[in-house]
Amino acid sequence: MLGPGWSLLAFSRMAGRFRHLPPRMRLQLVATVLGPSGAWWLRERIEGCLPISIGRRLEHATTDGNEVTLTFATANGDHRTATFDHVVAATGYRVDIDALGFLDPSLRRDIARTESTWPALGRSFESSAQGLYFTGQAAAATFGPVMRFVCGTGFAARRVGAAIADGRRAACMR
């Protein structure tokens, strides 16, 4: 369960059904149910387990086959480039597809929206741009306020993971 009280049980247990509510109702609930808050116990679970880069701003992203190359600017103006198999980007609390300058403008224009700024997502968190998934805060307008919290990551990971695995299996069958 998420937060105090039984009233939040539906958000933490039925995230998959949240997307069937009318868009305005979903956004109202996302705006009013539980504000952002960090958990003190997360730091020890991450530090030393994953590489963390702070003080960098994502400037550009390109793809080449199944790889993504990202270019970052550091606080002192240096630029760093790195290539990855998968990218998970945290964009902050205000979701606006047009503010994601690292995505090509034509790609941003092609992403279907909920109320003009949020990505409209399918049941597996995939946007209208095939192979582009949004989780976390960006998925809250579709799947509810639990997506902003750790308790929403299991639901999101199972859906996204299954969709990616299904896509790979389908590609192998061709």
Image (spheres, grey):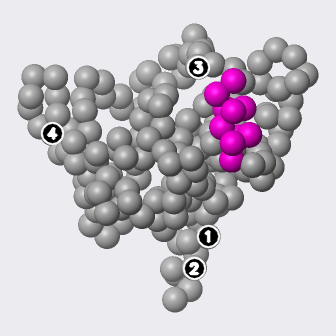
Are the residues flagged by discs 4 and 2 in contact, CB closer than 8 Å?
Answer: no
- Contact between marks 2 and 1 (CB within 8 A): the answer is yes
- Amino acid type of the residue that numbered disc 2 sits on in the rendered structure: Ala
Q: Along the polypeptide, which appears first: circle 1 or circle 3?
A: 3
Q: Relative to 43, say whether 154 is above or below.
A: below
**Amino acid type, residue under disc 1 in the picture:** Asp
Could you say which disc has been placed on residue 36 in the image? 3
Measured Cα–Cα span from mark 4 to mark 2: 35 Å
Which part of the image, by quadrant, shows the N terminus? Answer: top right
First reached walking from the N terminus: tag 2 or tag 3: 3
Q: Is residue 25 magenta?
A: yes
Q: Give the crowd class for mark 2: few <14, some 14-19, many >=20 residues within 10 Å.
A: few
Q: Check if mark 4's residue and mark 1's residue have beta carbons within 8 Å.
A: no
Q: Quadrant of residue 144?
A: top right
Q: Is residue 91 left or right of residue 138?
A: left
Closer to viewer: mark 1 or mark 3: 3
Tell me the amino acid under the disc marked 4: Arg
Q: Earlier in the sequence, mark 3 or mark 4?
A: 3
Residue indicated by mark 2: 170
Residue position for label 1: 166
Magenta span: 23-32
Q: Position of residue 129 (x, y in %)?
A: 46, 65
Main SS, magenta residues = helix
Amino acid type indicated by mark 3? Pro
- Tell me the SS state at disc 2: helix
Query: What's the distance in space between the residues labelled 1 and 3, CA to CA?
Result: 33 Å
Position of residue 114 in the picture relative to residue 62 (left or right): right
**Inter-mark Cα distance, 2 to 1:** 6 Å
